[in-house]
Image (cartoon, grey):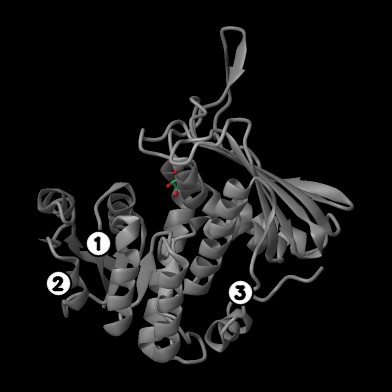
Amino acid sequence: MPIRIGVIGTGIMGADHVETITTAVSGAEVCCIADIDSRRAELIASRVPGAKALSAAEDLIESPEVDAVIIASSDATHSKYAKACIAARKPVLCEKPLAPTVPECEEILRLEEAAGVRMVQLGFMRRFDPGYVELRRRIASGEVGTPVLAHCVHRNLDVPASWTSETTVFSSASHEIDVMPWVLGRDITKVNWLSPTQVVPGSLCDPQVVIMELEGGALVFDELFVKSGYGYEIRCEVVGREGTLELAPTARVVARSSLKVSQDFPSDWRGRFAEAYRRELQAWVNAISRWRSGNVESAVDPLDGPDAWDGYRAAVVAHTVLVSMSRGGPAAVESMTLPELYSRSRVIATKTRLAG
Ligand code: ISE
């Protein structure tokens, strides 16, 4: 029996997940789609044979036809729906952020602890990108010695007019905030936010730089430039004591013409991370199937990837970046104690801290 998935939200990511599950993921099907815009829900559902459109997300979560839920609605609604899914014991793949505020994230952690199972996987898809996976593996192997620096570039073609400096931190920088500690095997202890443009609350400083200090003193320089004007580009180079490792450019074709060498950039993250999204969804579906089969050895929780703890930790660090932004200087990240439920998974799953 395929896993029957309900998708809440049919914006960019909701629609993309529906298409990926339907065309490129095995063992699952999209059965229900909910959006407050019922016409949009109907349009997306009409592309999937047998899928139903609903206007209330709560009905989708409670529907006996739905085994697992993807939350891709607006950020402010994530925690409300995640909590309803935990209560209904339905596995969730929640797009980031887990919730816009730290207390909301903490409430989700408490509910999962009370349920005794991690139900929520966070949509930090870079952890499934073959490039980042290889970078992490090769750093862990000691190939370039102890990592001491990382240079990250995160550029968007453009963003909507409502976008602010804070949005860049929560929507864009949150990816490096999640993936760099995972790649380097160390937590972030301090952040410092800088921009060549003047800080005006509620407006957009662009570009911005977030410097993250990790345990052991390694530094990550993260450039965020959301109105780069030329395309979507992600770069990452890790400098170790004995060499460097860098993500290779992802364009498949290099053109030479008119006295120029050139390659294409995707216009947004869907093109750059298509394979990461596919692997993320497949890993999640496989984990749910194992969990449902009742094989405790192979699946303690219905997820395989970043969890609610990772969403919480990213929220805490992102809020610390805002403190640095308003203060105009470095800010220390509060230390966080990993609850038993999440520490257990870090030994069982692939989350064991990397040595070095
Ligand atoms: C967008 O919201 C995403 O989540 C993308 O992954 C990120 O790279 C981009 O900067 C954000 O705007």
Residue 306 can be seen, yes or no: no
Mark 2 secondary-structure assignment = helix
Label 1 vs label 3, nearer the camera:
1
Residue 126 can be seen, yes or no: yes
Task: Find residue 334 and report its image quarter.
Answer: bottom right
Mark 3 secondary-structure assignment = loop
Above or below, comparing residue 324 to residue 102 in the picture: above
Q: Position of residue 7 (x, y in %)?
A: 25, 62
Distance from Cα at disc 2 to Cα at disc 3: 34 Å
Q: Which residue is mark 3?
A: 350
Distance from Cα at disc 1 to Cα at disc 3: 28 Å
Q: Nearer the viewer, residue 60 or 129?
A: 60
Left or right of 40: which side holds 7? right
Which residue extends farthest top?
258
Residue at image point 38% right, 78% down? 288
Q: Which residue is mark 2?
A: 59
Q: Position of residue 112 (x, y in %)?
A: 42, 83
Q: Which mark is residue 125?
A: none
Three-letter amino acid code at the position of disc 3: Thr
Task: Find residue 213 and report its image quarter.
Answer: bottom right
Q: Nearer the viewer, residue 331 or 37?
A: 331
Q: Which residue is mark 1?
A: 8
Q: Quadrant of the N terminus?
A: bottom left
Three-letter amino acid code at the position of disc 1: Ile
Does label 2 or label 1 sit earlier along the sequence?
1
Distance from Cα at disc 2 to Cα at disc 1: 10 Å
Which residue extends farthest right?
242
